[in-house]
Image: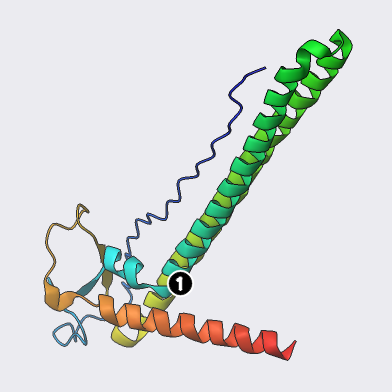
């Protein structure tokens, strides 16, 4: 039996989302390309960009989701550490009184402790998998929210390209006059606030 049965569980919460928005509306006429509403004209095509890092940093849905997952990770880690310490105490107690046990009692107790350790490891793995699945689901929801709003925003402006710009990304330079990050961010946060208000009203009615 391993004397050091302290189990350490670390789930790295990663919501590093690489979002590249590439919307190409080839069916739209480009005759009014010189009068872009928010962006400019690049080679006859209206192109704007969104600063991905800034968008994620200030999008309330992303911040709330990250906080929620971090809290769940913290709670699970504390739970597993508590269970691990309890099991370690049982192992130490067993070792102290093993000499007073019959061989059959010792084997039985050791088998029980091994089973508890295996159950704890399985619970740890299941918890990590469940949290990972929830994170993936939230990431998918994040992407859908942003993509959906950009499509609605673009219907009013008729851009041909809405690019995702981030340091170290494929775009080496972006003219600040083509930056629509704040407009997109304001719209996303307004929709998110509205959806939360609707959910709260629905809960009150129930």
Q: Which residue is drawn at 84% across and 14% down?
A: 101
Q: Nearer the viewer, residue 7 or 132?
A: 7
Residue 163 pos. (x, y %): 26, 66
Spot occupied by residue 167 in the image (x, y as percentages of width and height): 20, 57
Residue 136 lies, in percent from the top left, at 52, 54
Give the quadrant of residue 172.
bottom left
Q: Where 78 falls versus 37 (above or below)?
A: above
Question: Eyeballing the image, is 99 above or below 39?
Answer: above
Q: Which of 74 and 43 is in front in this view?
A: 74
Image position of 93 with respect to 43: above or below = above
Give the residue at mark 1.
61
Instruction: Report whether residue 177 is seen.
Output: yes
Q: Quadrant of the N terminus?
A: top right
Q: Is mark 1 on a helix, strand or loop?
A: helix
Q: Nearer the viewer, residue 139 or 158?
A: 139
Residue at 65% from the left image edge and 33% from the top image edge: 121
Q: In which quarter of the image is the C terminus?
A: bottom right
Q: How is the image coloured?
A: rainbow
Q: In this view, does 205 lie above or below 99?
A: below
Q: Give left or right: position of 202 versus 44.
A: right
Residue 132, how many percent across, how many down? 55, 49
Left or right side of 126 for 197: left
């Amino acid at each position: 039996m391993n004397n050091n049965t302290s189990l350490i569980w670390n789930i790295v919460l990663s919501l590093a989302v690489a979002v590249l928005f590439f919307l190409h509306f080839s069916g739209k006429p480009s005759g009014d390309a010189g009068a872009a509403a928010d962006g400019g004209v690049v080679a006859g095509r209206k192109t704007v960009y969104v600063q991905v890092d800034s968008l994620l940093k200030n999008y309330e849905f992303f911040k709330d989701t990250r906080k929620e997952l971090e809290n769940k990770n913290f709670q699970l880690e504390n739970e597993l550490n508590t269970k691990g310490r309890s099991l370690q105490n049982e192992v130490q107690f067993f070792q102290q009184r093993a000499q007073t046990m019959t061989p059959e009692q010792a084997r039985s107790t050791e088998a029980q402790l091994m089973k508890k350790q295996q159950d704890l490891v399985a619970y740890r793995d299941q918890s990590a998998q469940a949290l990972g699945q929830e994170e993936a689901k939230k990431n998918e929801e994040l992407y859908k929210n942003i993509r959906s709003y950009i499509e609605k925003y673009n219907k009013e402006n008729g851009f041909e390209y809405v690019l995702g710009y981030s340091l170290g990304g494929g775009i080496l330079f972006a003219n600040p006059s083509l930056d629509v990050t704040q407009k997109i961010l304001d719209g996303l946060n307004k929709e998110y606030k509205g959806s939360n208000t609707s959910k709260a009203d629905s809960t009150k009615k129930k």
